Image (cartoon, rainbow, N blue to C red):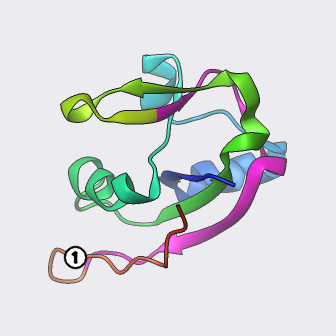
Amino acid sequence: MTTIYKICGRPDWRAAEREGMYRGSDIDARDGFIHFSSAAQTVETVEKHFSGQRDLMLVAVDAAVLGAALKWEPSRGGALFPHLYGTMPLSAVRWAKPLLDENGGKRAFPELEP
């Protein structure tokens, strides 16, 4: 099983829990797909795109549940990143945990499964 990760604001995640699906962030909507990262890419993604932000969630997702709507496409430096073309059903979520706010410019992460 391949686990991929989504970083999002806690209010967006709470809305997804109420709706039973995650529709993505404003940036996801602008780009036309929901951005995810592999375990190896997650820390860098948070540092690059979420530095200084508070009240974040880290969501672990079973990539297989997303089916053909999930595409691995080149992004940063040509690395393949998972992009979901559609909404994410909460049935794909393995777990969702708050990401601790930065302390001295660094965040603590839970163990990430590949």
> Where 11 falls versus 67 (above or below)?
below
Q: Horizontal and vertical percent for residue 111? A: 49, 78
Amino acid found under the numbered disc labelled 1: Lys
Q: Horizontal and vertical percent for residue 59? A: 59, 59
Q: Is residue 52 left or right of residue 24?
A: left
Whether the magenta-drawn stretch holds residue 91 is answered as yes
Q: Horizontal and vertical percent for residue 82? A: 50, 35
Q: Is residue 101 left or right of residue 89?
A: left
> Where 12 falls versus 35 (above or below)?
below
> Where 91 falls versus 21 (above or below)?
below
Taking the spot 59% from the left edge, 48% from the top edge, the residue there is: 12
Taking the spot 30% from the left edge, 53% from the top edge, the residue there is: 50
Q: Which residue is mark 1?
A: 106
Quarter of the N terminus within the rendering: bottom right
Whether the magenta-drawn stretch holds residue 101 is answered as yes
Q: Residues within 10 Å of mark 1 (few under 14, many from 20)?
A: few
- Where disc 1 sits, the SS reads loop
Which portion, as a residue range, is magenta? Answer: 82-102
Q: Horizontal and vertical percent for residue 69? A: 68, 22
Q: Is residue 51 left or right of residue 58?
A: left
Q: Nearer the viewer, residue 38 or 91?
A: 38
